[in-house]
Image (spheres, rainbow, N blue to C red):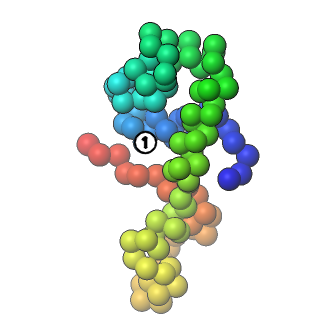
Amino acid sequence: MSKFNYLKEKKRYLDSIGRTGDECEGVRCSDCMLSGYNNGHIGVCCNVFEIERQEEATEMVRKWAEEHPRITNEEKFTQVFGSVEAFANEYTIGIPRDWWNEEYKEPKKE
């Protein structure tokens, strides 16, 4: 894994469990590993947990990130359609080259 960025991976984690707005808006505390329900310290809310137990919070997010590696658009495309080359031979693709290497983002469900 490349250099670990706690805030970036925390954002990705929260997005993966249903975040709909700023901070953790849209996420039920009972579903979040950092909350007082799940962080191993009953009654210690996530904000306090992240400040008072930074190492533990960081390790929880790091472990999640390692178990859920980032996937590029090309990797997701290949999972769904097979090889990019085979698809490109059959269809004209007007997708910028940089797009293939960007992180795949699951479409928002409405």
In the current view of this chain or complex, which residue is farthest to the bottom? 89
Quadrant location of the C terminus in the rendered image:
top left
Residue 55 figure quarter: top right
Q: Residue at x 47, y 87 (%)?
A: 86
Which residue ends up furthest to the right in the rendered image? 3
Q: Which residue is mark 1?
A: 16
Secondary element under disc 1, as helix, strand or loop, is helix
Res 100 → quadrant: bottom right
Q: Which is nearer the eye, 31 or 80?
A: 31
Residue 68, position as x, y percentages in the image: 51, 50
Number of callouts = 1
**Can residue 23 be spotted in the picture?**
no
Residue 38, how many percent across, how many down? 43, 25
Residue sticking out furthest to the left: 110
The residue shown at (35%, 46%) is 108
- Horizontal and vertical percent position of residue 66: 58, 49
**Compared to 35, does 19 lie above or below?**
below
5 vs 36: above or below: below
Q: Look at 47% across and 74% down and name the residue there.
A: 78
Can residue 100 be seen here?
yes
Residue at x 41%, y 52% (from the top left corner): 106
In this view, 102 is above or below 12: below
Disc 1 residue type (three-letter): Ser
> In screen coordinates, is 2 left or right of 17?
right
Of residues 79 and 58, which is closer to you in this image? 58
Mark 1, Cα crowd under 10 Å, few <14 / some 14-19 / many 20+, is: few
Q: Is residue 74 above or below residue 33?
A: below
